Image: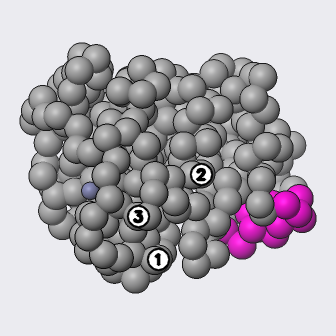
Amino acid sequence: MATVSVVLAADGDQSRPAQRVIPAARGDPGAVVDTQASGRRAPGGGREARPPATPAARVALLGRSVEGRPIRLIRLGDPGERPRALVFGCIHGTECEGIDVTRRLRSDRPSRPLWVVENLNPDGLRRGLRVNGRGVDLNRNFPSEWRPGGRPFDPEYPGLRPLSEPESRLAARLIRRLKPRVTVWFHQPQGVVRAFGHSVGVARRYARTATVPYATIRWPRGTAPNWQNQRLGMRSFVVELPAGALPAAAARRHAQALLAL
Ligand SMILES: [Zn+2]
């Protein structure tokens, strides 16, 4: 992954990289650098002799967390086709098994296009916290039915105001630019696909494909799906993986369900 950082750091601007990476007019990150980020091949080695069957992932730096860790957008699949779905592998730092699903997708190198943010909360993951690096629950920090309360590092502390956190602002800006037809947010540990309102249909289909339970549940206040569904009119739902490590077979089923969206 060091290659990714070097390549993108050479592009310079950390404060507004999404401006360059995701042209608003097209809504597709056409300028994303092809980094060969999986590191499977040496630079230039064998490229002409053995082209890949499907395109390598293209990776772009979206921005940085409170503590300065990179948050990246990965664009999988056929570059000529616009992705329908955007996937967030982790937003709560103690609920990050969704990253196993996104990494499986990436190693499979699907032809079906997909946008992926593997980890929106790298500080939480590193520190073993649900919240971000300054104690805000990113999934209570979105501007829809947001309300104040509590203290930093409370499990559902919503921040001082909506979108007070760099991580939630990155996600909101990305979602507004890409306008995905559907967004999937991975969490744990409930072991159920959850949706409400106009996202029920697509979430049910996902649950059937992944062979996991489904439940219709109202969006909690200030959550990203609440904002997407109720303010933006977008489809967005939650996949709650079970507690603990995700078995490889389950990761495969979820990866297939994402590609079927
Ligand atoms: Zn969660």
Q: Residue furthest bottom?
A: 127
Identify the disc placed on residue 159.
3
Q: Is mark 2 within 8 Å of ligand 1?
A: no
Q: Crowding at label 2, few (<14), some or many (≥20) Cα neighbours within 10 Å?
A: some
What is the x, y in percent for residue 180? 52, 26
| Residue segment shown in magenta | 1-13
| Residue under numbered circle 2 | 170
Spatial distance from mark 3 to mark 1, Cα to Cα?
Answer: 12 Å
In front: 22, or 110? 22
What is the x, y in percent for residue 188? 22, 57
Please, is residue 238 above or below residue 156 in the view? above
| Residue under numbered circle 1 | 133
Q: Quadrant of residue 48?
A: top right
> Residue, x 79% and y 43% (percent of image)?
19
Q: Amino acid at mark 1?
A: Gly
What is the x, y in percent for residue 236? 36, 31
